[in-house]
Image (spheres, helix red, strand yellow):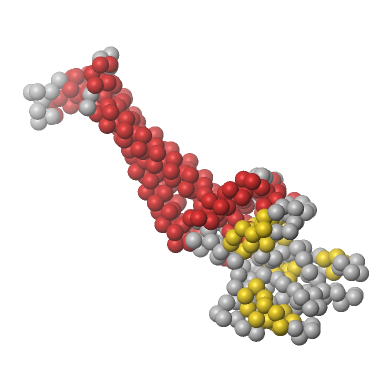
Amino acid sequence: MYLRDGLIRFLKIKNLIFVIVGVFLAAFCVETMTELTVFYWGDWETILTARRTPESAVLFLVGVGLILASRVSRRLIQDANFFSRYFEGDLSGYIGFEELAEVTGRTAAQIRRRLKLLRRIYMKKFRFVRSGGPEGEQIELYSKKVSCVCRSCGGEIEKRVYFTGECPWCGGSDLSAKVISGERFYCITENENRRVNDPSYYEARGLNKKIVWLTVGLVLAAGFVSFFLIMLLHQLVHFNDKAYLTREILSSDTHHRSTFELVQRHMRNLIILASFSVAAIGTAIPVLLKRLTVLRKARRYARFFSRIPTPYVPVSELAGAGNGNARRELRGVVRAIREGDLKGCSPEKHGGPLRIGLAKRIVKDRCPSCAAPITGAVDENYRCHYCGSLIMGVIRKH
């Protein structure tokens, strides 16, 4: 809802192209300069004044620049994914920078700068407004207004779509929308048709397809690395083998012009090519493995969250999502959210311990003891501001 999805898909494709082109340019330039240096070893003047030297240097810098640009863009997309998931789990429509600072471990100033940058390119439907609190400024999430009627006193008010609200006349928050205008309305009612045992609700779209394609890419990368590694070992073993060199000269169509030096020069070029191919493609293998691990963990977390009956998961219980400890699993959940592999969940900290908030809704409106309105609920258990009664199950998992 808060992401510019079309633009982000385009930027992801652009980042992939930048990485491929950047790696190719950098590897090609390094391979070219290595071949030139080996061939003219000791003749540094020839190496430095060769036509390929400045061209390789410029193309190498271009390749490194493309890689760095893609990494910066990818990091910003990850931050946009995280903040979007956090905004989707909010019930009030107003978020303070200090709240986000507690969850992310950054300062409020850093959060403010990052969100102002993200709003220009990657995100939408929120703005910064002045507040009367000590923080001075907060985030207001976008929402259309609809005409509503209070079920308690019958007063007509305007209600922000997606978020909870309360009647200015009696304080009640059990509001019924009179005009929807094509937008869904956040209705505060008991709902027994909650999503249970539905991992797909927490999985990002196309998660399983990504796992399949990454697995195929990993197998192909391993195959290419094996091929070039065999080529490299073959050339190294026979580089000083006189019998092999003789057979190569005799088997050549131009053997009358071939020499041991020319054959070894050709073999040296193949060694350099195979070495850089193994290094370039081999570098992609741990990246693919790491990404595949995050995707598999995201699928495991989605299954774990679908079995949780409450709208929140304490960090201490995340150990049950895998074989690691709770803190390690928390980092895995945050990583999956930042990568855009999980939805419907986000870390939250409403003045208490850090926990994972799942898709939730408010299902109770008044205190059963004194009938006072329930306002500002952030947890499934709510302490009445008027009589002090503890009300259970105010917020439930959606």
Observer-nearest of 181 and 352: 181
Observer-nearest of 86 and 31: 86
Residue 113 drawn at (x, y percent): 58, 48
The residue depicted at 42 percent of the width and 49 percent of the height is 15
The residue depicted at 62 percent of the width and 45 percent of the height is 110
Count of marks placed on residues: 0
Work out which residue is located at the far top of the displayed protein and give it: 42
Left or right: 314, with 3 as reference point? right
Please identify the quadrant where the C terminus is shown.
bottom right
Please identify the quadrant where the N terminus is shown.
bottom right
Answer with the quarter of the image where residue 265 lies: top left
Residue 308 drawn at (x, y percent): 70, 63
Answer with the quarter of the image where residue 267 lies: top left
**Whether residue 236 is situated above or below residue 328 in the rendered picture:** above
Residue 164 appears in the rendering: yes
Residue 277 appears in the rendering: no
Residue 388 drawn at (x, y percent): 90, 66
The residue depicted at 36 percent of the width and 41 percent of the height is 22
The residue depicted at 28 percent of the width and 28 percent of the height is 54
Left or right: 21, with 154 as reference point? left
Left or right: 242, with 185 as reference point? left
Work out which residue is located at the far left of the displayed protein and give it: 256
Residue 227 drawn at (x, y percent): 33, 38
Answer with the quarter of the image where residue 313 lies: bottom right
Observer-nearest of 316 and 16: 16
Left or right: 387, with 394 as reference point? right
**Whether residue 198 is situated above or below residue 147 in the rendered picture:** above
